[in-house]
Amino acid sequence: MRLDGGHPALDLINTLYGQVRQPPEYDVLRTPDDLQTFAARVGVGGEATSAAAVTAARALRAVCEDAFRDGKCAGLERAAQAAYAAGSLQPGGWVWSDAPMGVVHRLAHAATELLASEELDRLRGCDDCCWLYLDRSKNRSRKWCSMADCGTNAKKRRYIEKRRSKLT
Ligand SMILES: [Zn+2]
């Protein structure tokens, strides 16, 4: 499980591996244990989850994709409304105690916060895969989800293309 998005909502989108608008090659979120591990690692709770929560998290992932890749927010709006209907507002912020769905609600809340945040103008798509991330580099020039993975792949490909063009 790699977390290169820089935000829980983007890391949720990035639990699918593959290319933009192509069938996913791999899904990190398959079992309640996967969701629990993911939620704990992105800081939205570590309680036990359920198969229903995994289904809800995958649905939330799809509407986050619509919102952050395409600017279509209706699905995320519904997910956020469901989250706020299930939560309670207290000093310090929203609280969700309804395990096992709490982690999904916290992720929906995090997604709406990012959508409203100034950080949104740092949102980028990787040049080499379907992942999204916040470009927090100083000159805003980050091109890949990760230098170690897609960055290296892209460089290798360029090198091979260069050599090939020299040979022909
Ligand atoms: Zn990538």
Image (tube, rainbow, N blue to C red):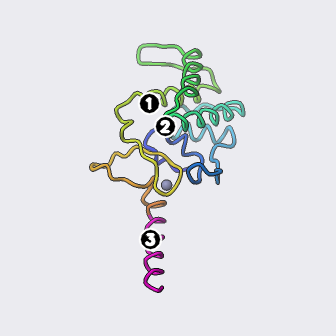
Residue at position x 59%, y 16% in the image? 86
The residue under label 2 is 68
List x then y, in percent, for residue 56. 65, 31
Q: What stretch is highlighted in magenta?
A: 152-168
Q: Mark 3 points at which residue?
A: 158
Residue located 68% across and 37% down the image: 32
CB under 8 Å between discs 2 and 1:
yes
Image vertical order of residue 67 relative to residue 2, above or below: above
Q: From the image, tell me which residue sits under label 1.
A: 115
The amino acid beneath tag 3 is Arg
Task: Locate residue 57: give its quadrant.
Answer: top right
Does the magenta run of residues contain 30? no
State which tag comes first along the sequence, 2 or 1: 2
In the rendered image of this protein, does residue 138 appear above or below residue 79?
A: below
The extreme bottom residue here reads 167
Q: Position of residue 111 (x, y in %)?
A: 49, 31
Give the Cα separation between the discs numbered 1 and 3: 35 Å
Q: In the figure, 59 relative to 18: above or below?
A: above
Judged left or right of residue 31, residue 157 is left
Which numbered disc, 3 or 2, marks the residue that appears first in the sequence?
2
**In terms of secondary structure, where does tag 2 sit?**
helix
Amino acid type at circle 1 is Leu
Name the residue located 65 percent from the left edge and 51 percent from the top edge.
23
